[in-house]
Image: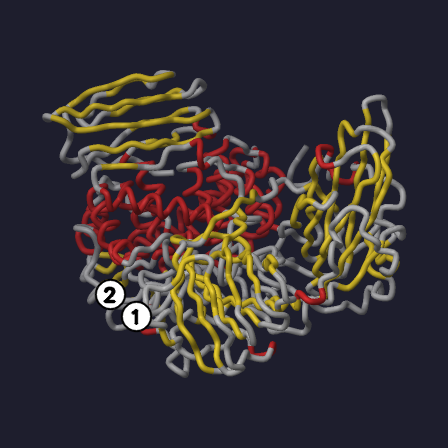
Amino acid sequence: MNPLYQRSRPSCLDIRWEPGAGLIWMQGETLFFENPRNRTLRFRKTFHLPFDPVSAELRVFADTHYQLFLNGAPCARGPGRSDPTWTYYDHLDVAPRLHRGDNDIALLVLFQGFGTGSRISIMQGLLFHLVIRGADGEHLAIVSDRSWKAAPAEEFLRPTPRLHGPLGCIEVQDTQLIPDGWLRPGYDDSGWAATDYVKSGLTVTPWYHFVPSPLPLRSESDVETLPRARLASAHGPAPAPDALGQPRPVPVPVPGDGAVFPVRLPATAPDTAHVVTLDLARIENGLLRLEIDGPAGAVVDALFADSIAPGDVIPKPEQARILTGRWILRGDRQTLEVAFNWLAFRHVQLWVWSPGPVTVHRAWLRTLYYPLPVGQVEGFRCSDDSLTRLDAICAHTVRLCYQDGIVDSPSREQQQWIGDARRTAIFNHHRWGDAALHRNLIEQIGQGMDWMGSMVPRYPSGNRNVSPIPSYCLDWIGAFEEFYQFTGDDSLLAHWWPNLLLAIRWFSAFERPDDGLLARVPHWIYIDMGRDAAGRGMGSGEVLATLNLQYLSALRAIAGYANRLGDQASHAWFASRAERLASSLREQFWNETEHGYADAMTDGVLTEGVSEVTAAHALLFLESPGSPRAAQIIKRVLARGGSDPATVVRASPFSIHTVLQALRLHGREQDALDLIRQRYRPLLDAGATATWEHWELSEHGRTDASSYPRHASACHAWGAAPMAFFTGVVLGIRPQSPGWKQVEIRPFCGDLEDASGACLTPQGLLEVRWHVRSATFTLHIKAPSGIEGTVLMPDGSRHPLRTGLFTCESAPAKHREPTGKPR
């Protein structure tokens, strides 16, 4: 099969669906062209099972979110983000949750009716398909059809404000309106409305293909808040629903040491609120739950944040409302829970207005995490405790950002940007080696390509408020190679080859004919967020060095892909374009006075100054280790733990991985280690539990017009690069062939006395531990079967990598030669 002209039949087209299966909604709201915005419904169905179930294959999808309960117990929540032309349904075996006799199905379904940063909401609808089989060949099918019952979930008030462009609406729940016992088996739903089809079949729908999700359901567990709460009061009545998310009065602390659970709050006047500030000890991801007792009509607001400002002020996220939820109490002891708006947060602040006493018995989080094999892999440890702590922070951040996609921030945005996620996926492969979410990322971003080859920078997304980011398209092209190297799976390449050619072709419209340099490229030219002391940043100018260096890397990648596919004409074409572009960059962007490559050129004039980002890209893609220019760049820009911010544009956390990779390639591991210590010290000193979006949370003194604190994200995985550096450099675990079949163990001691850690490869767990004692370097390795390779000791001696546990010794080294191209 020639991948340029042919493709295989989608296997999802051959999945069998039982007769009658369609997309249903409550009768009276099924017109496809009249979509009820922010509408939540309950669905129920009772069925009789005349045999003992051996298997029960369930498929379930809803636009936009669902919670599923079987026989009164929580079963699943979803679906995950997906493109409407390639729609994921959740699938699981629910046989253990069923029994002979009557069984009850219940769902709570939210249809948003508008796009967010993770959902493309099209049309109200629930799809349910359950096939139950017995030991003797018995068969029973339960599908979404007209036999179901539905009722509005009136406790969810609407309309309410949006939390943010990438997020949904603020949840306001009047719990007095929840029908008592609706989840219990045998509940009388005879008074509920009938259901009807929105689409009576699955062939002609706006969801072109229904595809079994390639991802596991997120795992759930409980995390308690810290036992002591901080108490305060605030003046002002409860805000109206349409004012939720706006800045609030500064709380006035109540004298004393706070309170422990149960937290007892006396009655308040209508214009006074109790303020209870709770702490989870670290940022966690999930849904808040409260066990609470208070009078009917009492109002409880919850404000969420991944960081907190002085005075226990919940800051306003950039470009968003304060992350908020609300409940109205029903008048007895009850459990409150966020239904759909999962968030990552560390701090939650309860604002309580009540005519009578309120008791908060318990506060906890129902966590949601992609099931990475966290418990199977030892974290990095070394003699520098600050680096050990930093690795734990980085690993936790990656885990927080691994959800139903690889998200930039699990609080403010929850969007899958390819530039962010490409880096996060690399960090994952240096610890847990998960391939499913990485593959899913590449395919989903590709689904956002337009007819010209340009790409939306985040996808799937109905939050279409930005243009393409050209550098992110180049990130997508490069991600295929990284996936292949880390997993050994090259199947994506043939499937996406025409799209890759279309993506790289888009850039050709902006090549200058005489030298091949990209010039005046349109859209959002995002390079990095770093700035020098004078405020000079990246991304402005007619011809940008970094963008062209990224284009050079993409041209080389495309040439390599063509070679693997046997497309020699394409290989020759793109290899020659890359060679010409490299020559043009060397000739036109080198600034001898600055001892480095300029960031941009306009009308033939180079910009003044240099940047870490351009320098790092030049060291990775243009200058070979040991070359005279490479030595000048390192001395001027990157040596000795980082550059002078007065004369060099420093890299933001977004690009720090590129800088560390460049230093590693050129044998400057100690400089990289010093840089990590310098840049991450403020984060460690602040007691952070995740890596930040910027080097400071309130960088540039961010406040809104009223001087209310405004914070950047305190959980952004693009800053978790040290995790990959510790595994790949300090432990020295480096893949040398696709799928880690060939591995080099090349540890770096530097100023450390010991280090240990592990990496889960496709072949199994690879563990490394070393220490320096009495001028002897001792290395212990435990390697799985199926891996071959070399152990390169600090003194230059080599040993074959053996299966099982073995030990090597040598003298430690003070200087390392360039290591070759990193992965």
Residue linked to disc 1:
536
Query: In the structure shown, which secondary structural element does the residue marked by tag 1 occupy?
Result: loop
Q: What residue type is labelled 1?
A: Arg
Mark 2 residue type: Gly
Q: Is residue 791 above or below residue 628?
A: above
From the viewer's perspective, tell me whether residue 27 is left or right of residue 743.
right
Label 2: state its secondary structure: loop
x, y (%) of residue 793?
Answer: 22, 25
Above or below 638: residue 699:
below
Q: Quadrant of residue 76?
A: top right
In this picture, residue 448 sits left or right of residue 798: right
Label 2, on which residue?
Answer: 609
Q: Return the residue found at the far left.
A: 774
Report the front residue among 20 and 103. Answer: 103
Q: Is residue 623 above or below residue 746?
A: below
Please say whether residue 104 is visible from this viewpoint: yes
**Which numbered disc, 1 or 2, marks the residue that appears first in the sequence?**
1
Which quadrant is home to the N terminus? top right
Q: Which residue is drawn at 80% across and 28% down?
A: 52
